[in-house]
Amino acid sequence: MNVYDIARSPTFLATIVAMVTTSLPVTRLIAPRLALASCVRAFLVRDTTACAPLPPAQRLNRFPAAPMCSISWTVSGELEAAAPGLTLPDVRMPAALFGGPRSYPLVSYNPGPVHSFIVMFYPAALHALTGVAMGPMLDQFRPLDDMFDADWQSLSQAVLAAPDDEARVALVENFLAPRWQLARQQDDHPASAIHDWVRRLGVQAASSGLASGARNIERRIKTWAGQPMRTLRRMRRAEQLFLDERDAMLQGKVSWSDLAGQGGYADQAHFCRETREITGLTPTELAQASRNDESYWIYRVWA
């Protein structure tokens, strides 16, 4: 068979069409409506169902340590734990999963194509909505049905059955909006006027209740947010610094010593040490991985 015959063959043509029409993985970060901005940090969508199969190493999902909690729905495909310390009895994760705040980087794995829809909550806000104390939920993962009442379970079923991600966002926002408005009316909650939510959390903890000693304040913060104030401030500083310099980092046009000084770290070594604690990588390794490794998709989309 000559080159002309090969070019005309059905197999060759089908391969070319597949290469042209195959999409890249879909990764989206969606901001909530303004009325929910102090409750929901963001919606995340990850969809690899329409792209060419990713190699196994690229099916990993690498998440940093984070003060937020989350509800994750696996709309299509499967999600597995790929790091130690997870509390589920099986490596296979349920379709609807609650995740508490995280004190260490986390890795999950998709055996094949997957479509995930994730809602990131401010932990104090989810505590206000559900009464779930966030302290015991640190580094915990639980099936959603084990954590929340029938209304939340009905929402979960509707999210999984929704026709697209826009409908899922609308379902969650319409469910949360009246509940969040009521929660804010009933209590001047620490998440009700967030600009720098960590600073606001500390102020509210100090002014709530009759006992205002340091231990009582710290206890309230752990109940609302799951982690001590010192850890929250450290994570908030790192997140803001990486957001501010995200483009420069991805382009390799950043001085780590200058960045350390800009962020208020003692020195570059201090900055590198905290970056490794939160992400598992040094700043240089993180910048390279964010540019070149599909499994670090969340670092590219988070902005």
Image (cartoon, rainbow, N blue to C red):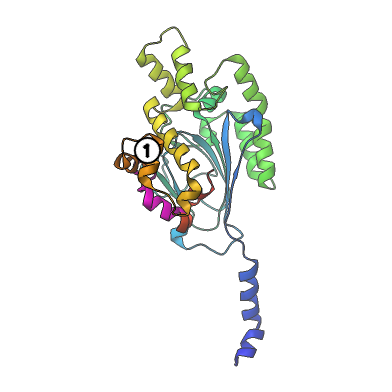
Element under disc 1 = helix
- Outermost residue, bottom side: 2
Q: Is residue 285 magenta?
A: yes
Q: For the residue carrying disc 1, how many other residues have a C-alpha within 10 Å: few (<14), some (14-19), or many (20+)? A: few
Closest to the observer, 218 or 300: 300
Q: Is residue 94 above or below residue 148?
A: below
Residue at image coords 55%, 30% = 148
Q: Nearer the viewer, residue 33 or 183?
A: 33
Left or right of 257, for residue 79: right
Pick the front one: 92 or 138: 138
Say which residue label 1 marks.
261
| Residue 252 can be seen in this image | yes
The residue closer to the viewer here, 40 or 163, is 40
> Which quarter of the rendering shows the C terminus?
top right
Identified by mark 1, the residue type is: Gly
View extreme (top): residue = 210
Residue depicted at 64% across the width and 76% down the height: 14
Quadrant including the N terminus: bottom right
Find residue 50 and report its horizontal and vertical position in percent: 61, 60
Is residue 136 shown in magenta?
no
Q: Is residue 11 above or below residue 279?
A: below
* Extent of the magenta region: 276-290
| Residue 133 percent coordinates (x, y) | 46, 24
What residue is rendered at 43% in x and 43% in y? 64
Residue 136 locus on image (x, y percent): 41, 28
Which quadrant holds residue 141? top left
- Examine the image and state in which quarter residue 222 appears: top left
Image point (54%, 48%), residue name: 301
Numbered disc total: 1
Residue 84 horizontal/vertical position (percent): 35, 45
Farthest left residue?
269
Residue 206's image quarter? top left
